């Protein structure tokens, strides 16, 4: 299942600054997720400092669990909105009799 994950600030938490060591650990964990096939794409939005991830997981719950491995999530500095995606069914209309 394809999952879209949008970074967000945890409820009520002020945006904190992560240490260089924590950011390095974040990058290493993201690399591990990518190498495992879970993390397919990783971007930052062009209009604000917010990560956008595309994951491939069996379920939204698995995606949440895997995102929880990220040090910034584990430390409560960021969270993600997890959005399960399904394929667009409208193309079938092009071939309907």
Image (cartoon, rainbow, N blue to C red):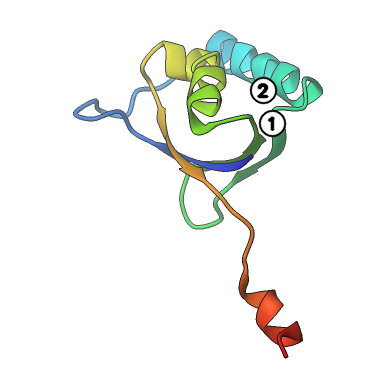
Q: Residue furthest right?
A: 35
Image vertical order of residue 22 relative to residue 35, above or below: above
Q: Are marks 2 and 1 in contact (CB under 8 Å)?
A: yes
Q: Residue at x 62, y 75 (%)?
A: 90
Image vertical order of residue 69 relative to residue 15, above or below: above
Specify whether residue 88 is in view: yes
| Horizontal arrangement in the rendering, residue 95 relative to residue 51 (left or right) | right
Q: Residues within 10 Å of mark 1 (few under 14, many from 20)?
A: many
Image vertical order of residue 60 relative to residue 52, above or below: above
| Horizontal arrangement in the rendering, residue 86 relative to residue 35 (left or right) | left
Q: Residues within 10 Å of mark 2 (few under 14, many from 20)?
A: many
Residue beneath disc 1: 39
| Horizontal arrangement in the rendering, residue 92 relative to residue 14 (left or right) | right
Q: Residue at x 48, y 25 (%)?
A: 61
Measured as percent of width and height from the top left, residue 57 is found at 64, 30
Q: Which mark sits nearer the N-terminus, 2 or 1?
A: 2
Measured as percent of width and height from the top left, residue 58 is found at 62, 29
Residue beneath disc 2: 30
Asked which secondary structure carries label 2, the reply is helix
Measured as percent of width and height from the top left, residue 15 is found at 32, 29
Image vertical order of residue 65 relative to residue 40, above or below: above
| Horizontal arrangement in the rendering, residue 85 relative to residue 78 (left or right) | right
Which image quarter: residue 76?
top left
Asked which secondary structure carries label 1, the reply is strand
**Quadrant of the rendering where the C terminus is positioned:** bottom right
Q: What is the CA distance from the residue labelled 2 to the residue labelled 1?
A: 7 Å
Which image quarter: residue 63?
top right
């Amino acid at each position: 299942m394809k999952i879209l994950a949008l970074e967000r600030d945890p409820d009520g938490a002020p945006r904190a600054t992560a240490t260089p060591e924590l950011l390095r650990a974040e990058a290493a964990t993201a690399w591990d997720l990518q190498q495992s096939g879970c993390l397919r794409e990783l971007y930052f939005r062009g209009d604000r400092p917010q990560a956008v991830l595309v994951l491939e997981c069996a379920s939204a719950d698995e995606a949440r669990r895997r995102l929880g491995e990220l040090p910034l999530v584990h430390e409560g500095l960021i969270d993600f909105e997890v959005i399960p995606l399904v394929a667009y069914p409208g193309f079938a209309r092009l071939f309907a009799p």
